Amino acid sequence: MTDSAMSETGHNRIWVLADDRAGNVNQAVGVAEAMACRFERIDISYTRAAQLPNFVRRASLLGVTPRSREKLHAPWPELVIAAGRRTAPVARWIKRQSGGKTRICQIMRPDGGEKEFDLIAVPAHDGVRAAENILEIPGAPHRISETRLVLEGKAWRRKFHGLPHPLIALIVGGSTKKTTFTAEMARDMTQTAIKAARDTGGALLVTTSRRTGRDNESLIADLLEKANVPFHLHGWNSTEDNPYFGFLALADILIVTGDSVSMCCEACAAPGGVYIYAPDGIAAPRHRRLHQNLFDRGYARPLGQGQGAALADARKTAKLEVFHHPSLQPARLVAQRCLELIGERG
């Protein structure tokens, strides 16, 4: 697949290693797009051996399927951009095959061979020890640029024409391997958004994810139907075009669950005021450190604290308001360093 930047020798200057995790792919592709260069996306599939720790896999194609290996051959690129632990050995292998000429940028900790990477971009909340090749960034890279938001806003504005402002987007994630999005959370978050719409005379733009769960989706839909406030609901299984990017572009206020690093960072790229819903049990410690980093930098505000009855009481008195913040664009910071890496060769 190509978006290719061709060098004088005719080969693709930039490769993006894209595996089967959408969050990883969005981060790597987001950096490549922010470079404003054409690039080639190399899709990587894995065998069970990819589960081995990277001190075993080292700089190798161990754990990469034969079909994916066929895509990795000379002429080698000037730059490889990859994200996530499993792509790191592949990036290191490419660099060695090129005789050290290929520069490699890894997003998130590679968990091995750190000195071989020309650039490692890590979120500030990860608390990685400083080094010459470490770039600390505020949050995770993504693909939501200001230009894209303008285009998405134009594309979706007519769909939501007539809904009263403020438009309040409710972006619902769900359970993860380590945390559970409960019915109590789904009810509490939805009722908070409904109250905000009533208090302000606005409307709700609601979207769920595959992790929300069928029962929670039904609960959210029932609450909205009975609330007597204007709303637009896009369920995970809907066959209609996904308005997620339109929500980001047009919402005056965004409420997002704190279970997803990507969703929180994408929301903070949008112009609307961002509130992160993160009661006890919904977010891992690493996610909580991200939330605090976003709060401290003014990108977002917390939506209540604690859990259970105490949290419900806090919601009753909480007042959501439109506020402005800078657009969170960590991909741009990484892209600049990547351009410097390949620019050094003239």
Image (spheres, rainbow, N blue to C red):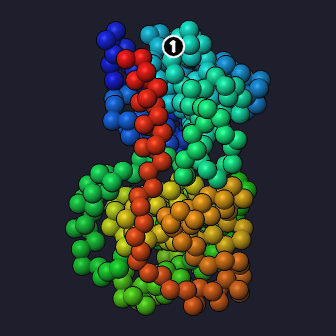
Q: Residue at x 64, y 22 (%)?
A: 116
Residue 284 x %, y %: 70, 59
The reply to whether residue 86 is in sight is no
Q: Quadrant of the C terminus?
A: top left
In the depicted view, which residue is nearer to us: 130 or 38?
130
Count of residue discs: 1
Q: Does residue 197 appear to the left or right of 114 in the view shown?
A: left
In the depicted view, which residue is nearer to us: 92 or 233?
92
Q: Quadrant of the N terminus?
A: top left
In the depicted view, which residue is nearer to us: 26 or 136?
136
Is residue 87 shown above or below 279?
A: above
| Quadrant position of residue 323 | bottom left
Residue 75 x %, y %: 44, 10
Is residue 119 shown above or below 319?
A: above
Amino acid type, mark 1: Lys
Is residue 249 shown above or below 128?
A: below
Residue underneath mark 1: 101
Q: Residue at x 69, y 55 (%)?
A: 286
Mark 1: secondary structure? loop
The reply to whether residue 154 is in sight is yes
Q: Residue at x 36, y 88 (%)?
A: 201
* Residue count near mark 1 (Cα–Cα under 10 Å), binned few <14, some 14–19, many ≥20: some
In the depicted view, which residue is nearer to us: 280 or 46?
280
Residue 105 x %, y %: 54, 30
